[in-house]
Image (cartoon, coloured by chain):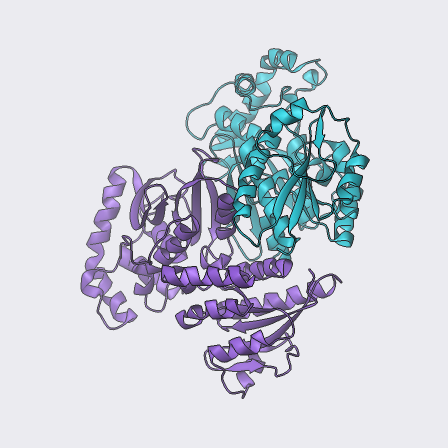
Chain colours: A purple, B cyan
Amino acid sequence: MAVKEVYIAVIGAGGVGKAFLSQLESLSTRLSRTPSSPKLSLILLSSSKKVLYTHKYTALSLGNTASSLAQSAQEPLSLPQIIEYLAAAPSKAVLVDNTSSQDVANQYPAFLAKGISIVTPNKKAFSGTFKLWQEIFGAASTSGAKVYHESSVGAGLPVISTLKELVDTGDEVTRIEGVFSGTMSFLFNSFAPTEGSGGKWSAEVKKAKELGYTEPDPRDDLNGLDVARKLTILARLAGLEVASPTSFPVQSLIPKELESVSSGDEFIENLPKFDSQMEETKAAAEKEGKVVRFVGSIDVGKKEVKVGLEKFDRSHPIASLKGSDNIISFYTKRYGTNPLIIQGAGAGGEVTAMGVTGDLIKVLERL
Amino acid sequence: MAVKEVYIAVIGAGGVGKAFLSQLESLSTRLSRTPSSPKLSLILLSSSKKVLYTHKYTALSLGNTASSLAQSAQEPLSLPQIIEYLAAAPSKAVLVDNTSSQDVANQYPAFLAKGISIVTPNKKAFSGTFKLWQEIFGAASTSGAKVYHESSVGAGLPVISTLKELVDTGDEVTRIEGVFSGTMSFLFNSFAPTEGSGGKWSAEVKKAKELGYTEPDPRDDLNGLDVARKLTILARLAGLEVASPTSFPVQSLIPKELESVSSGDEFIENLPKFDSQMEETKAAAEKEGKVVRFVGSIDVGKKEVKVGLEKFDRSHPIASLKGSDNIISFYTKRYGTNPLIIQGAGAGGEVTAMGVTGDLIKVLERL
């Protein structure tokens, strides 16, 4: 690493943001023991309401960032102001975007054009319009700034790095298939387990919500859009020009009648009326000795992407998934009949932040 | 990438070596289309008998390297001569060691000390003495040269990069467990399948040898040393100072009486006499509703590494492995009860070379 000091700006101080700041503190301490490593200086931290930054690029203390941010009385900065501030830093700067904000994502090309590298779990930038995708990687290519987003699919699981390596070393990825949502994984592993009969659909959704495994409004998981965004990212990395996450078939598990009810609570309350639909699907799979799962798949040759319910043999790795684990199978020319499989927790603050920290290390090694 | 030209020297022209040269040709073509990427110049290629290199560091043609090497009449170079040649190159040089030679491995510190980076699937360097391990990473740290060896465990599967990232981002790896040998995987998936009764042990070994899944002398697989080497590498990356691959319990599947027979053929001929031992092991597992598998495991907290037969429930991912696939489970503090699992082909020229090519790309991005 040739650079002596790297300036870090962190946007987003929720679950992932807090876990990242803790990992950043450990990383910074570890690097400070290696003379050839750069000094990491956190110079800006912002949440949706507050901002904390230093005027002369001196480092903020990494010790109690959360309370310092809460006490900050600094005037909020707009995104263009943040770009200007980082672009004028006396050494390389990295933006860590721990939000899921489309507004921040839309500014990535502007950050990158100014030489500011980006690491992020934010799916919005890479699953929005194909134009934004092109602008992001175009700006990075021109300025030499880096952009990594491992945690945008499967949290800290090495999904994106593996797909990139398959492509970059010249393998031919033919098909990608898997369970990409921790929430959907949990729901179907309980609703249609490989052993035993499972609970009612509405009861499982209610339980998942109570355990905090769903979004505040479970419809934000059940509409399939989160999975569609991840599939969009992987399909693009595999070489397909996917226009948007709504440009291919995505099966929503929200009953039509409940699409417009006003709240998540009202949705949960009314869902039992529609249990028969999901019971039928489950029974149809059971008749074939199979179980139903919510999966995403990409057929690269046919340029087909889809998200929805599919049936799997009980012995299939997708069927025997546990808890809220994700599983991603890469079928390629080199790997032949048996895919390269990656499996494990695909959600949660700590593992998501781990992917972000891992990306930051990659950027540091390449600056 | 700041470097304009990178010189590549390839030692080893067997199965992996040939597959790598083909991937290098594709990579070189791809990079030549990206103006900011360095030019890759192959300047030396050697097999155990021949060497081909250019006196003025002009690039060898990547088109028909195998036949050019076969026709070469150049005087063989010693390893110190190769080091001298690469150290004097007018730009950064990378050694690609596609051998499994301990002699080459022993010279890694000398290569690295001269600023020559190394990418390799050669297990010997990283699973030999702990002193060699320290010298290798010490030399790299001092000179800034890079050393990557993804394919030394699980071929192209992202095993080493994942373990490094877990450690580097501050996760606590508590346990690593898996099937690390394609040969052992194939043998046990046939001998003790999760469904059906499987063949006789000696018959499965004979079949595996005929299919080319074993070393010419199958005892080189059955002694467990290959797996012990891989465990040594992973344990060291997880922070354990493992002295050597023979410093922990390794179960050999070679009957004592056949340890000293003169050839692999004689071994195969006499193996049926000892089938009862393995049948008993299989039957004992079956009584518990389990199957037997040849696994390696590392308990990081207890500093225990071991290799040998263990019993698994039929529904366990290790039990339901297919073909000659490897599976590696990382249990960590962040991942909790369910491990991060990586699975797929862990042997074969193409996928092994892919790990090497992937490592070369990583080096290029960091030079």
In percent of the image, x 46 and y 67: which residue is there?
A109
In percent of the image, x 26 and y 57: which residue is there?
A253
| Residue A12 against residue A283 in the figure, above or below | below
Q: Nearer the viewer, residue B6 or B338?
A: B6
Please tell me how many numbered marks the rendered image carries.
0
| Residue A217 against residue B265 in the figure, above or below | below
Q: Nearer the viewer, residue A159 or A301?
A: A301
| Residue B75 against residue A95 in the figure, above or below | above
Which image quadrant for residue B100? top right
Which image quadrant for residue A207? bottom left
Residue A199 image offset from top left, x and y in percent: 30, 53
Residue A73 image offset from top left, x and y in percent: 54, 88
Q: In this rendering, would B186 be left or right of A37?
A: left
Q: Nearer the viewer, residue A344 or B286?
A: A344
| Residue B249 against residue A245 in the figure, above or below | above
Q: Is residue B303 visible?
A: no
Residue A193 image offset from top left, x and y in percent: 35, 47
Q: Is residue B237 visible?
A: yes
Q: In this rendering, would B130 be left or right of B317?
A: right
In percent of the image, x 59 and y 30: which residue is there?
B18
Location of the N terminus of chain B by quadrant is bottom right
Residue B327 image offset from top left, x and y in percent: 53, 39
